Image (tube, helix red, strand yellow):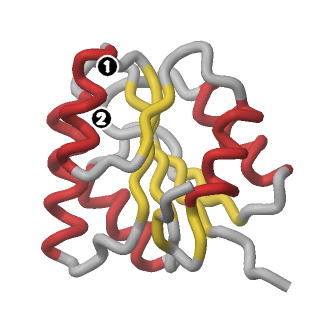
Amino acid sequence: MVAPIRIVVAKPGLDGHDRGAKVIARALRDAGHEVIYTGLHQTPEQIVETAIQEDADVIGLSVLSGAHMTLFKKLIELLDERDARDIVVIGGGIIPEADIPLLKELGVAQVFTPGATTTEIVAWVRDHVQDGSAVEA
């Protein structure tokens, strides 16, 4: 039996809209993954600490505030500092298409924009995360 993938779903910054994050968290849990939802208003430091303490395989950030470039960059820098870049970082929210290649250059494995289905997100995690690391499909 394969161990379930452990996923931290987080809402960084001051954005108070978490319905989408909760829908994604539930879909991932229903698909058999272990999901830890951090709640609203988390700092990148809190998110990284939670992911390390929970031995997470994936961090999923939901960003609707427009601060995605800053928040993802800081999160990845903190993962580097903690020697935890084996944790796969994915994200979603209101993220302009033009920013997605820049986020991927920073180390974000995948970005889901509005309209992405829970089925698509669950399938991506299933197909691209194994043993706590991203794999090519």
> Is 127 rendered above or below residue 56?
above
C-beta proximity under 8 Å, tags 1 and 2: yes
Binning the other alpha carbons within 10 Å of mark 2 as few (below 14), some (14 to 19) or many (20 upward) gives some
Which quadrant of the rendered structure holds the N terminus? bottom right
> Is 118 rendered above or below residue 106?
above
Rounded to the nearest angstrom, the CA distance separating label 1 from label 2 is 8 Å
Q: Position of residue 64 (x, y in %)?
A: 39, 20
Circle 2 residue: 13
Pick the front one: 103 or 6: 103
Nearer-N-terminus badge (1/2): 2
Pick the front one: 50 or 69: 69
Per the image, label 2 sits on a secondary structure element best described as loop
- The three-letter code of the residue at mark 1 reads Ser
Given the current orientation, which residue lies at the most extreme bottom position?
1
Q: Residue at x 62, y 46 (%)?
A: 124
Circle 1 residue: 65
Question: Mark on residue 89?
Answer: none
Per the image, label 1 sits on a secondary structure element best described as loop
Q: Residue at x 52, y 70 (%)?
A: 57
Q: Quadrant of residue 65?
A: top left
Q: Position of residue 45 (x, y in %)?
A: 25, 59
Which quadrant of the rendered structure holds the C terminus? bottom right
Q: Is residue 120 left or right of residue 106?
A: right
Q: Quadrant of residue 51?
A: bottom left
Q: Quadrant of residue 72?
A: top left
- The three-letter code of the residue at mark 2 reads Gly
Q: Position of residue 3 (x, y in %)?
A: 74, 81
Q: Is residue 83 left or right of residue 38?
A: left
